Amino acid sequence: MFLKKIVFMGTPDFSVPVLESLVQSEYEVVLVVTQPDRPKGRKRVMTPPPVKVEAEKHNIPVFQPEKLRNEYDEILSYNPDLIVTAAYGQILPNALLDAPEFGCINVHASLLPELRGGAPIHYAIVQGKKETGITIMYMVEKLDAGDILTQVSVPIEEEDNVGTMHDKLSKAGSSLLLETLPKLFAKQLEQVKQDEAQATFASNIKREQERIDWKKDNQAVYNQIRGLHPWPVAFTTYEGNVMKIWWGEVDSTIYEGKPGEIVKKIDDEAFVVVCGNQKGVKITEIQPAGKKRMSVKDYLRGSSDRIKLGIIMGE
């Protein structure tokens, strides 16, 4: 019996455990397709995508097209039985979708049809969802709209953030893929069409979505902070200067004060900002303008007056 040949397409850290699971499976990964190397950091050093680094560890050929729509012949030359994608970053053209005997499937980090798009983990947390999950579905040219093959739910705990959920979902996606493939190759899976009326979208986070609106209730503000942690990080302003808010906690005490007002300092380790429902968010980790990320305790160590009561953040 010949091994099924798989082309894997992915780019960021999320994709790496999925690739690892395929490499360690009974299938043959004949090619990895990922985005081109990009300049990163202040020195703009050309940096390979995490998936490329992982593929090279296993001596798997790597293909990095700038525009897949014009450069897919290389992929077809490997004659794959199946293409698997996970956070690749480009929509596949029909000529590629139709080529493999078993089609093209995608590992997506939401319970489709909810949260189609590039930032489903962020949106799930910002929207205060109690669970999200992984969907494996057939790919079509329309974004994340193909028939569903399998799904698994993953709970979102109150303390979870994008980083913790990224790791949970990447692991869940790897496991679900390995459970799905034998049934897919045996043609034992039922395809379920997505209900377009239930579709929601999670497009990439824009700068204005990172700005905290203190008029919202304290749970919504907390969800925004953890839904943008550790990237791209929520921000506000303090006396006109941008301040990133890395972490905080819900404070259910009722406070007097305007939304955004600093109403309390706690042992020089945290400060409380009142929100639109008159309840607070206790801020514990910040990044003042021009400085590194630090705890509030470290920031106030130099002078407790660095954070003043009565200041309204965001103005």
Image: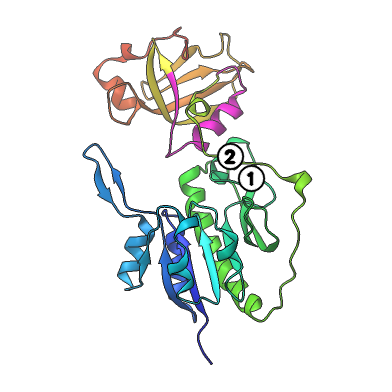
- Picture coordinates of residue 304, whole percent (x, y): 31, 15
Determine the image quadrant of residue 186: bottom right
Vertical placement of residue 300 versus 315, above or below: below
| Marks 2 & 1, CB-CB < 8 Å contact | yes
Residue drawn at point x = 48 percent, y = 19 percent: 272
**What is the secondary structure assignment of the residue under circle 2?**
helix
Reading the image, the residue beneath label 2 is: 123
| Camera-nearest residue between 182 and 288 | 182
- Picture coordinates of residue 128, whole percent (x, y): 63, 37
Any mark on residue 10, and which? none
CA distance for labels 2 and 1: 7 Å
Specify start and end residues of the magenta stretch as a single range.
214-236
The crowd level at tag 1 (other Cα within 10 Å; few <14, some 14-19, many 20+) is many
| Camera-nearest residue between 23 and 187 | 187
Lower sequence index among marks 2 and 1: 1
Residue drawn at point x = 63 percent, y = 45 percent: 115
Q: Which marked residue is nearer to the observer: mark 2 or mark 1?
A: 1
Determine the image quadrant of residue 17: bottom left
Left or right: 98 in relation to 260: right
Magenta region includes residue 262:
no
Vertical placement of residue 180 versus 259, above or below: below
Any mark on residue 115, and which? 1
Amino acid type, residue under disc 2 in the picture: Tyr
Left or right: 312 in relation to 95: left
